[in-house]
């Protein structure tokens, strides 16, 4: 409901009707609608952290760890919990300040994972920019895939992760021909 109607647009009645329970049952489990939003956000972030941790577990080199991080982010974003991530991106600010602390801690944990991996990547000379800025750009681009990637297969997610790694590291794929632009005396692509 929060994904479809937004937090403000989804009523407790909408939620109970969609799940097939009474309002009494709802209020037995949750004191407020905000508590449901909190549970959705916390569950999605916790699941996302677990997916990323599993991906990172087998990655050894900094480049492999970056690929695992990107792959895990995409997998979590496009999993059965994708609704939770979409709601997080749009409705995070609906949580009252006094209830935000645990969510901010989860978010900081995730940022720290990114920054740690990116520091390894930077130490290898694969990126030259500020790691915090790189993280914001990468996560923003990855999150935007919820708008243009629909029901990807695991293979499509793997290829998308590959594409992101090459793009973010500004690398040509092995075997890709480098075509010089017009200012370099070469032909423009498609001509």
Image (tube, grey):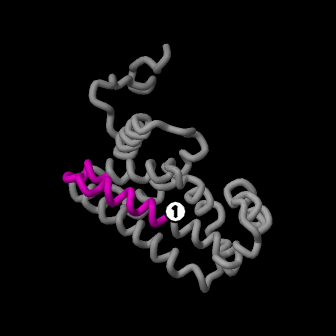
Label 1, secondary structure: give it: helix
Q: At x 43% / y 40%, what residue is drawn?
A: 157
> In which quadrant of the rendered image does the N terminus lie?
bottom right
Q: At x 32% / y 53%, what residue is drawn?
A: 55
Residue 1 can be seen in this image:
no
Q: Is residue 54 magenta?
A: yes
Percent position of residue 32, x then y: 70, 78
| Residue lying farthest to the bottom in this orientation | 98
| Residue lying farthest to the top in this orientation | 191
Q: Which residue is mark 1?
A: 44
Percent position of residue 7, x then y: 72, 65
Percent position of residue 182, x then y: 45, 23
Q: Is residue 93 above or below residue 81?
A: below
Side of 70 where 145 appears, left or right: right
Badge count = 1
Q: At x 73% / y 57%, what residue is drawn?
A: 18
What secondary structure characterizes most of the magenta part?
helix
Side of 168 where 140 appears, left or right: right
The residue carrying pointer 1 sits among few (fewer than 14), some (14 to 19) or many (20 or more) residues within 10 Å by Cα, namely: many
Q: Is residue 175 above or below residue 118?
A: above
Q: Is residue 158 above or below residue 79?
A: above
Q: Which residues are magenta?
A: 44-66
Percent position of residue 59, x then y: 24, 52
Q: Nearer the viewer, residue 133 or 85?
A: 85
Hey, which quadrant is residue 48 in on the image? bottom left
Q: Is residue 185 magenta?
A: no
Residue 42 can be seen in this image:
yes
């Amino acid at each position: 409901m929060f994904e479809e109607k937004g937090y403000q647009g989804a009523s407790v009645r909408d939620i109970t009707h969609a799940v097939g329970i009474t309002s009494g049952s709802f209020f037995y489990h949750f004191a407020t609608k905000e508590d449901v939003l909190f549970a959705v956000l916390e569950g999605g972030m916790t699941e996302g952290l677990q997916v990323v941790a599993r991906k990172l577990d087998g990655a050894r080199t900094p480049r492999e760890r970056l690929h695992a991080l990107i792959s895990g982010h995409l997998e979590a974003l496009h999993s059965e919990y994708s609704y939770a991530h979409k709601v997080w991106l749009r409705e995070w600010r609906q949580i009252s300040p006094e209830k935000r602390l645990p969510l901010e801690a989860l978010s900081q944990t995730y940022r720290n994972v990114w920054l740690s991996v990116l520091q390894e990547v930077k130490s290898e000379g694969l990126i030259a920019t500020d790691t915090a800025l790189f993280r914001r750009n990468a996560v923003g681009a990855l999150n935007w895939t919820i708008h243009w990637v629909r029901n990807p297969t695991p293979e499509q997610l793997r290829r998308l992760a590959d594409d992101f790694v090459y793009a973010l590291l500004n690398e040509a794929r092995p075997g890709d021909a480098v075509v010089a632009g017009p200012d370099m005396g070469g032909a423009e692509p498609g001509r």
